[in-house]
Image: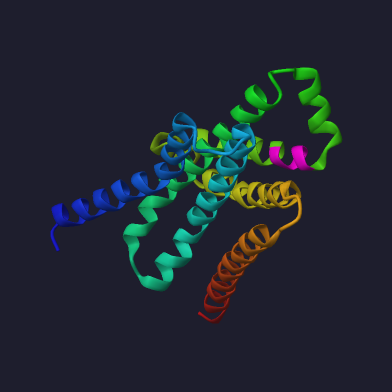
Amino acid sequence: MTVSDARRRVLLLKGLTWVICLIPLVWSVWLFTTGRGSVDPVEEWLHRSGKTSVIILIASLAVTPLRRLAGWNDLQKLRRLLGLFAFFYAVVHLGVYLYFDQGLAWSFIVEDVVERPFIFSGTLSFLLMVPLALTSTRGAIRRLGKKWVTLHRLVYIAMAAALLHYTWGQKADIRDPLIAAAIVVALFAARVWWWWQKRARAAAA
């Protein structure tokens, strides 16, 4: 396969990723503008944007395990894009909460964050995602070097906080958050297993 063929394949993968990741946003806008959405559009936007952020963040974490299992190295080129889309939907989620749900009433917002673990965990997840998004450029990766890898391990803490926020935000049915948590645990276990195998091979060498 030539370099141009490989580049076209990567561009195709990225194009498909853009289309898939934008579907929830387009769908939400269409429902809202046509009046076919929920009777509580703010609640609907909050739920859909938050859930979409969690799903895409899990997809970004799944890239490396899938690449190792399938041997398809092109998948690694999607991880940064998926991470940025997860952050984008987290920004939408936060924006809907701050503006439409709370009306930018900062005293109530601060009280919400301090007194409600549900809101605190979501805020913590978002704040942890901010430096990850800001350092996702090639320039930041070059400047930070090995520190970039250490910094981006915060994604696991951000993911845990997001899952807590997702779980506590459900009124009764927590099956979806539990499924998401099980997938994350499996992905993390796979990484730990590969890390242990690497250590074992190095010790035996």
Residue 78 shown left or right of residue 39 in the figure: left
Q: Looking at the picture, does residue 8 appear above or below residue 107?
A: below
Q: Is residue 119 magenta?
A: yes
Quadrant in which residue 114 is drawn: top right
Disc count in the image?
0
Residue 108 shown left or right of residue 83 in the figure: right
- Report the span colored magenta: 118-122
Q: Residue at x 76, y 55 (%)?
A: 172
Q: Is residue 188 magenta?
A: no
Q: Residue at x 63, y 64 (%)?
A: 179
Residue 58 shown left or right of residue 43 in the figure: left
Residue 23 shown left or right of residue 116 in the figure: left
Rendered-image quadrant of the N terminus: bottom left
What secondary structure characterizes most of the magenta part?
Answer: helix
Residue 53 horizontal/vertical position (percent): 55, 45
Q: Looking at the picture, does residue 154 appear above or below residue 39?
A: below
Q: Nearer the viewer, residue 146 or 27?
A: 27
Quadrant in which residue 33 is drawn: top left
Quadrant in which residue 104 is drawn: top right
Residue 76 horizontal/vertical position (percent): 39, 56
Q: Residue furthest right?
A: 115
Residue 17 horizontal/vertical position (percent): 36, 49
Residue 97 horizontal/vertical position (percent): 66, 30
> Can residue 5 be seen in the rendering of this structure?
yes
> Can residue 130 be seen in the rendering of this structure?
no
Q: Nearer the viewer, residue 5 or 21?
A: 21
Q: Residue at x 46, y 35 (%)?
A: 140
Q: Residue at x 48, y 38 (%)?
A: 28
Q: Residue furthest bottom?
A: 204
Question: Which coloring applies here?
Answer: rainbow
Q: Looking at the picture, does residue 163 appear above or below residue 102?
A: below
Q: Nearer the viewer, residue 138 or 163?
A: 163
